[in-house]
Every structure is written in C-alpha cells, then in structure tokens.
Amino acid sequence: MAVTPREVVGREEELGAIVGSLDPERLPSTAVVTGAAGIGKTTLLAAGIDAASALGYRILAARPAETETQLSFSNLSDLIGGFADEILPELPPIQRRALEGALLLGESEADAGDRTVAAAFLGAVRVLARDGAVCLAVDDIQWLDAASLAALRYVLARLDQEPVATLLAARGALPESVRRAVPEGRLRTVDVGGLSVGATHELLRGRLDATFPRPILLRIWETSRGNPFFALELATALQRRNGTLALGEELPIPSNLDELLRARLDGLGRDALEVTRVVAALADPTATLVEAVCGGARLDAGLAEALEARILELEGDRLRFTHPLLRSAVAARQTPARRRSLHARLADAVPSAEERTRHLGRATAEPDNHVASLLEEAARTAQARGAPAAAADLAEQALRVTPPSSRDDARRRLLLAAEMHSRAGDATRATELLTGELGGAAPGDERATVISHLAHVETSPEAARRLYQEALDEARDDALRAQIHLSLARLSCWGDGIARGGQHADLAVAAAARVDDVALRCRATAVYAEMHFRLGRGIPTARMEEALALERSLGEWPLDEGPAEVLLYQLVWSADTDRARELVLELRHTVKAQDDPALQAGALWWLGLLEWRAGNWEAAERYAADAVDLRTQLGTLMPPDEFPSAIVAAHRGRIDDARETAHRSIVRAKAENIGIAQSGHGWVLGFVELSLGDAAAALPHLRRSYEFRNPVMLEPAQRVELGDLLEALIAVGELDDADEILETWQERAGRVDRAWALAILARSRGLLLAARGDLEGAFASFERALAEHDRTTDPFHRARTLLALGRTQRRAKRRGAARATLEQARAAFEQLGAPLWAEQARAELARIGGRASSRDELTEAERRIAVLVAEGRTNREVASALFLTQHSVETALTRVYRKLGVRSRAELAHRLAAKT
C-alpha cells in the first residue's frame, strides 16, 4: 500500500514504509521517522496521519514544543484530552482519578504517581481501540515532557493484540528508552535523508513557483544537503535578488539562518576563523594543505577549536564543514580584498593546475592577458574532461580579466563561456552573453559565429533553424559552414524534410573535407550516416566503423553529436536492442563520470525508448521520467522529450496520463512547428483508442501521424504508427488503402531486412487477407510474422500477433487452437503489464465458449473507484481515499473504461449519472 499526498515530494519510499505500518494485519505496530531538523519529518508524519484517517483510524496526536519539556503530562493531555468524556467512565476509580489529575480535569490536586497515570493511559488506549483502530502520533518526540514520555513507553511495551499503530518523529536517533520499550519485530525505523536534486527542483517549483538554472539549483541542493527547509529558505532569499548570482558570488543566506550561523561562528578565535576560511576556499581541503597555507602552529590551535565547536570535522586527512551552510557563511563573511589575498596564497599552495589557475583568477582584480590565457586553457581542460559548469566558470573568469584591447581573445572566451553555460543548463546566461556580443560583431564570419552559437542555445527548433540559416548566409569559412550545415541537417527532421537534411549532410561532408579538423570530419561523417539511415537506406556500416574508430582515436569519446550518438540512434530505431543497450549503458557511464547533464539526459531518454521496445516497461518508465526531470532542470524540455513517457503510460493502460501528456505535447509542438512531435504524440492518441477497441476513433490520429512522418522518416523500424494504422484501416473496411501502404513498406523493409517491421507488416497482411476471406493465406502470413518476431526482442508486438492469429482462428471455428493461442497472448500481455490488451484477449477467449464478455459488470472495488473518478477526483486522490497504490487505481480504471465502453473521465461521469 502507498499514498502520495500532493505536498509530499520525493519521499515515495519513506511514505510507503510509514503507510505499510498501518496495515491492519501488522497491528500493533510502531513506525519512527528520524532525521535532521527541517528534513521533512513533520510532513511525512502528517501524510501518515492522513492515510490513517482515510483508513478509519481514530487519531490521538501531539506535537510537543521544546518549551514544554518541564510541564508534566502536558502532551498526554494533547493525546487523549479530547476523548476524556468517553474514556474516564470506563476506567477503574484509581486510574480515573489519576488521569483526571494528570489532565487537570478533576477537583483533586493529589499526585497519584506516574505509574498509575501510565496504567490509566494504557487503559484509555484500550478503551478507544475497542471500537476500531487507533493511531497514536507524536511529532518531535525528543520534546515530550518526561512524564508523558514515560507513559508512552509504558503503553508501547504492553500493547499486544490491540489494533494500535504508533507514528513517531524524532530529531536525530530515536531515544533508546523508547526503542527498548517496543517489542522486537514491531518497530520500523524510517530514516529521512536529503531530497534528490530532482525532488528539490520539484519542491521549489511547487512551493515557490520558482525555477533556477541547473548550476544554481545544484548549489542550492549542495548547500542545503537536500534539506527541504534550508532549500526553501535559500531559494526564497535568492528570489529576492532576481534569482541570479554574480561570478564567484555565494548564495545569499536568509536572516533567520544567518542568525543561527553567526551564533556558531562568532565565538571562534582568530586562528580558528582563518582555518575555516582556508577550508571554505579549497576544492579538496586536507589538513596537510591547510597547514601549508596557515602554518603548523595556527593550524593546530585553530583546527582544534573548529573541531570542538563542531564547525569542521576531520576524516583521515580530509577536512569538511559539518554542514555546507557553514561553508557558505564563512566564505560570505570576508571583504573582497581579504578574499583576493587568500586566493593568492592558495594559488601558490594547491597541487592541481586547474585549481591553481582558478585561485589565481580569483586573486586577480585588474585585466591581465597572461592570467586570462591560463584561465582559458584551464577552461578547455575542464571542457575536455566533460565538466561544463567548471569550464563555464573558468571561461567567464578569463573573460573578466581579458584586456579591452584583446577583442579576438575576448570573443573566443565569451563563446566558450556561452557554450559551457548552455551545456551546464544555464541557457539564460549563455543567451545573455551572446546577445551582448552580437551588436559588436563584424559582418561575415564573426557575426555568423555568434549567430550560430545563439541558434545552438535556442530551444525552439524553428527559431534555431532560422538563426542557422541566417548564419549560413553570412559565413565564408569552410569549417564554420560545415558546422552550420551539420546543425541544419539534424534539424531537418523537425520541419524541412529528410531530403533537405541529406543535402545539408552532403554539403557538410564536402566543406569538412577542405579543413584540417579531424573532429569536424568525424562529425560530418556521422551526420551523413544518420541522414542515410533516416532516408531508409540502412546503416552505412563501413563509413560508421571508420567514423567510430576516428572518434575513439581523438581521446574525447563520445564526441558531442558524434558517431557514437549516431550509432545509438541507428541501433535503437532499427530495433537492435541488445547492441543498443550495451552502447547506451557505456555512454551513460562515461557521461555520468564527466558530469555532463545534457548528455546524461540524452542517455536516459534513449534508455526509456529502448526498454519500452524491449518490453521492460517499469525500467522504461523510470528512465523516461528521469530524462524529463533532468531536461526540465536544464530548461531544454521540448515536446519530443516526453515521448517515451507518453508511450509507456499508453502501453501500461494509464490512458488519462497518456492522453494528458500527448495533448500537452501536441499543443506545444504546434506552437513551435515541430511536426515530428505532433506525429509521435498523435500516434500515442491513436494507439490509446485502438487499445480501447475503437478503430474508428483511432484512425484520424494514426493517419495524421503517418502523413507527418512520411517526409522525414523513411526507415521502416522507426514507423511505430504503421502497424496500428494498418490494423485500424482494416478494422473499418478501408482495405485498398491498407493494401497500398503494405506494398510500399513491404518493399522498403525487405530492402534493409528489418525484422521488426517485417513482422508487423506480415501480421497486417494476415489481417487484410482474413478480412477478404482468404483464411489459409492469413494463417500463413501470421506464421511468417511469428518467424520474424523470433528475430526481434519486442514481446508486446509478438503478443499482438498471437492475439490477431487467435481471433482469426476463432472466426474460422478452430476453437481449440484459438483458445491455446489466445491464452498465450493473454499471459504475455499480463506479464508485460498491458491491461487493455489483456482484456481484449480475455474477451476473445470468452467468445469461444459462446458467451459475450460482460462490459457492464463492475466489481465492488471497480465501482468504488469509478464513483470517485466520476466525482472529479484525480487518480492520486482516489488512491489516498481508498488506501490503494496509484498504479492499482490506474489499472482498475482501464478495466472500468473497457467494461462500460467509455473513453474518458467525462464519459464515465455521464454514464454513471445516467444509471442513478
């Protein structure tokens, strides 16, 4: 069981553990939420209480404050005071008097003793539990007054068969006395750590309606350690400063946190402060390095004080702050002059060339071309190792100290900084730099270079295409023209058409051949091979192997938009899943090590698509969601990015999610003139209708998808809409149109021997022959389809071929064979998690026995779900109300839609209203 209230972000696993302790079969039980202040314990506990309330638990809750620790039984009154009239008459006289005294309800002021009150508290809980389950909930248990804590321990130790669930939250570890009170096997501890980067992003977007460039988001996350409270406070302070930071500037610390940090830091002596400043400025502070900067005597005295004050901690030789907020506070509390002086000293001490150069840049206040050159070299080193954020910082430092007279150097460094900012996820800063440079750029190559960089940062394909074309009109240099042609070739799938893309690829290869640039020639060959594949001519193996060998030899694998990326594209879309998986996992490992978020997002997107095709839909859903999350953080999310998410939702029967994602993406794709995205998401909408058994409703979506793709996608295995379009055409009787499409694509798929497409086309041919009455020809075609499926790894389409074969066998009165075939199809669909298609197989099986499947008989569970959905509740709200997982609601809802013959929530509401 799991409930995910709206306000809980990134805590699904922890919340699942809490809700699991509420299972009636596990009572009595105790769940304890532990973690640091502000980490989200209270939010989780509140969500657990909501879940308990939804299950019908009676809630006894207390939230003690630190100021109440000396007030005996104050928290006991919070827990049961509201039930006194119900409880007291049921207790023995001595316990009743004791409890009245503890709750300050009686006239007697006699002290009955803590043990008697504890026994009365146990009796009270048992009285309340006679009529149903009870949830005892205490937040911040460390602030419980001693008498209430003793009473709670007494109760926990003596609960036996009572239906009582206890939910506790504790800062740090659970008090050992409470832990010992709970019998073995009944205690579940839920440790709450920091949120992930993605969850922090969602938290800030949901609570503050704020999004930040990914480098700043990472700084908020790192400084807060994923603590929701600290992250919100830091983000709020940053919002007050327009959400931006100057070069080298620290995050602003809000006043409430600053007061706490000042209280920690103001008491430090001079030597301790100096040690903390050095540690704050170093990328990898060690005691040895700090000693080299501060001197041995100062280190010994200052380090001892900082360690004792819990400002720093020492692990081996490495030093670090006990919390990153302390590092930020120390770094911010320095004058510019003191900061430059410190960086100058560090530049002479650090062993790493890149860090030495960074400190040298921070120490330099006036223009200095020598320092600027060193910084540029360090930036390119960081770029080569795949660290765009570090490269952007170094390049901007180089730009800052470049003399005004060195215009060529300044422009080169600005372009590098803009490119690295864009790759790191700060497109706003990249655009700001480039737009400022464009006004002063001379006509010709200089202006073309800046425009092409602006095009690269642009997230709208149509706007990018216009900018590249403008740059091409200005450019004269062969290397520059080759690069622009490469970009235009890749953009061709968004609008120009694949034929135009092939022309740009040919021009790029010709221009690159006139230039002594191995990496450029390597990219040109790769894009030529990509266009060759898109044109339906297969993979040009010899040229790809040549380009791949060249790429590996360059020492910067994988090249951005190079042969490895193109080969991955070809393998995934040609349905060569095993080779594609091997390559994408290698790429993902490499780009994760390089910390390049743009390439990481790309690898995750391909993994989502790949695992969907391979039938591993849970993994596909996870990868697709991670890709969307990362691209949202980068600010580069486009309609195609949600394609794998929409596909998986549709195949898993979550039709509302699939429709919502597809419709949203189509609206954006139309606004940005991205035809391929309109096609992909249009296919998703058609597939949903076909899954529901409505070929007529599916056909318009599938026709549009097919027509959009024809100019830009001639590779047969890319045409995911093809089999659905053919099935819909045949189902509505448009057999001649289906025949014509079959002839066209049969020849294309045969030419490149694409087994995945050949299997689907053979299945479609079988459906067409059966519709024309040629049953023997149909059976032969289905057998050919199954033989082709044996050469692929797509279990979903194999199951669909079995379903088509079983239907045809049933119609041919071959009932025994039909039953066996349809059982195989049903089992395959159920194993995949394709409920709509499993339902189609079950319906066919029911018809074999002469019974029409019931479409209007809901189970009681399905009826409850249908009623709540018809009321307008979301799947998440239904899951919370019925104490189910969201996935269970989604799966049941697909069955409800099919049984009632409806296709949307609105139709469901109308249908149920008509029946009442």
Image (cartoon, helix red, strand yellow):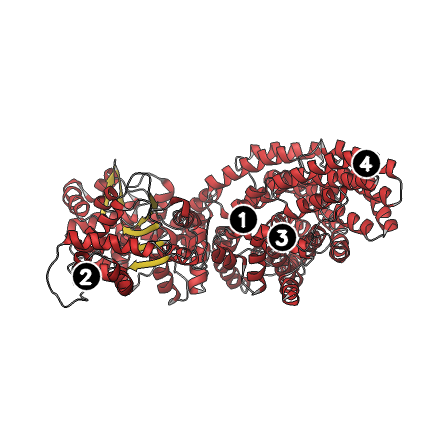
Dot 1 crowding, Cα within 10 Å, few <14, some 14–19, many 20+: many
User: Which of pointers 2 and 1 lies earlier in the amino acid sequence?
Assistant: 2
Which residue is at the front of the view, 890 or 97? 97
The kind of residue on which mark 1 rests is: Ala
Residue at the spot of label 4: 814
User: Which of pointers 1 and 4 lies earlier in the amino acid sequence?
Assistant: 1
Residue at the spot of label 1: 627
The kind of residue on which mark 4 rests is: Arg
Tell me how far mark 4 sits from mark 3, CA to CA: 30 Å
Q: Say which quarter of the image contains residue 64.
A: bottom left
Tell me how far mark 1 sits from mark 4, CA to CA: 47 Å
Residue at the spot of label 2: 68
Which residue is at the front of the view, 474 or 44? 44
Q: Where does residue 872 sit, x and y in percent of width and height?
A: 56, 65
* Residue drawn at (34%, 59%) of the image: 59
**Could you tell me which secondary element the residue under label 2 belongs to?**
helix
User: Which of pointers 3 and 1 lies earlier in the amino acid sequence?
Assistant: 1
Residue at the spot of label 3: 894
The kind of residue on which mark 2 rests is: Glu
Q: Is residue 345 at least partly visible in the picture? A: no
**Could you tell me which secondary element the residue under label 3 belongs to?**
helix
Tell me how far mark 2 sits from mark 1, CA to CA: 48 Å
Of discs 2 and 4, which sits in the foreground?
Answer: 4
Q: Where does residue 187 sit, x and y in percent of width and height?
A: 32, 43
* 443 sits to left or right of 843: left
